[in-house]
Amino acid sequence: MKLASLIRPSSKASPRSDDGRPLFAIGHVPLTGDDVGALADFYASIGFRKVARLPGIAILELRGGTHVAISTGPVGVTTLDLMVDEVEATHELLALAGAEPSDITRSFPHRVFTATDPEGNTLLVHSSHVAGVV
């Protein structure tokens, strides 16, 4: 397929698919820890969709189809930068899950807080501001 066929005539500076979505999406985000199963269970408990659990790896899915690939490796080295529609409800959910969220602050154009998963990885949670169809 030629690039020209992917570019909508009204938007030559910004290639888009035929349905207006950006051409690229994040496919996989690596996340490591000591206990793959426990970490996968934590993320499933807060709303990630379980896709697969194999020896040494678990795959969970986010909105938009991005997969988080959890495998054995260094702990506390990953930051997941997440966007949600309901900041307060997500803050409460993470508090109930034991993730010890920080206070919610404003960082234009977002409302934002941080939390920590059971392996010490950081969750940076922002209010959503998507622009168009995603």
Image: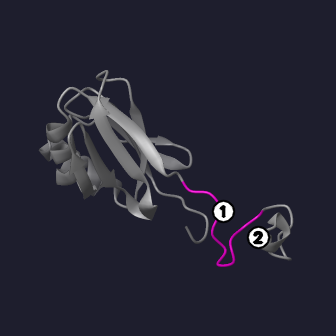
The residue wearing badge 2 is 6
- Mark count: 2
- Percent across and percent down for residue 45 are 17, 52
Q: Residue at x 86, y 67 (%)?
A: 12
* Quarter of the rendering occupied by the C terminus: bottom right
Q: Residue at x 30, y 52 (%)?
A: 60
Rendering quarter of residue 11: bottom right
| Crowdedness near tag 2: few (<14), some (14–19) or many (≥20) residues, C-alpha within 10 Å | some
Q: Is residue 54 left or right of residue 134?
A: left
Task: Determine whether 88 is above or below 118 in the image.
Answer: below
- Magenta span: 15-25
Task: Say if residue 102 shows up in the picture.
Answer: no
Dot 2: element: helix
- Percent across and percent down for residue 16 are 72, 68
- Percent across and percent down for residue 54 are 22, 46
Report the front residue among 73 and 132.
73
Task: Determine whether 99 is above or below 88 in the image.
Answer: above
Q: Residue at x 41, y 33 (%)?
A: 79
- Give the CA separation, mark 1 to mark 2: 8 Å
> CB atoms at circles 1 and 2 under 8 Å apart?
yes
Report the front residue among 104 and 20.
20
Task: Determine whether 129 is above or below 18 in the image.
Answer: above
Say which amino acid is labelled 1. Leu
Dot 1: element: loop
- Percent across and percent down for residue 34 are 20, 26
The residue wearing badge 1 is 23
